[in-house]
Amino acid sequence: PVATEFLAYAYYDGDHGLQQDIPRAYELWTEAARLGDLKAHFHLGCIYDEGDGVEQDVARGVRHFQYAAMQGHPDSRFELGCIEYDSGNHELAVRHWMISAK
């Protein structure tokens, strides 16, 4: 899954001689996430949260962040804190940020 996630990021950015292809990046991140790659869950969380190349679905993005955060991915935990902060749940946001800082 690590190579798949790497290739997805290369398609997303148009790096390493590849043309930018966000739909292909989405497909590869989905496959890597299915195989358990936490960075892939993080990137899927980001694109669903922002609606970047897919229809915005914050709840779906949160699910990806939650899965990765529960497995110890600090960037996903940080993003959950940002989402909670933006929703007015400042106390919960700070808890997420404290966990992500460890």
Image: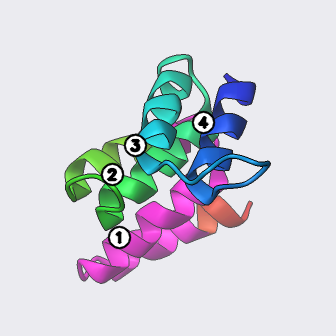
Q: Nearer the viewer, residue 14 or 64?
A: 14
| Residue position for label 3 | 23
Alpha carbon distance from label 4 to label 1: 19 Å
Type of the residue with mark 4: Leu
Task: Report the residue at 73% width, 28% height from top.
Answer: 2
Sequence order check, earlier mark of 2 and 3: 3
Up-down: is 12 above or below 3? below
Q: Which mark is residue 38?
A: 4
Task: Report the residue at 57% width, 22% height from top.
Answer: 36
Q: Which mark is residue 83?
A: 1
Q: Which image quadrant: the C terminus?
A: bottom right
Alpha carbon distance from label 4 to label 2: 13 Å
Task: Report the residue at 79% width, 48% height from top.
Answer: 16
- Tags 2 and 3 in contact by the CB under 8 Å rule? no
Type of the residue with mark 2: Val
Magenta residue span: 68-97
Q: Where residue 20 sits: x, y (%)? A: 56, 54
Type of the residue with mark 1: Ile
Q: Secondary structure at mark 3?
A: helix
* Most frequent secondary structure within the magenta stretch: helix
Sequence order check, earlier mark of 3 and 4: 3
- Tags 1 and 3 in contact by the CB under 8 Å rule? no
Nearer to us of marks 4 and 1 is 4
- Tags 1 and 2 in contact by the CB under 8 Å rule? yes
| Residue position for label 2 | 62
- Tags 4 and 1 in contact by the CB under 8 Å rule? no
Type of the residue with mark 3: Pro
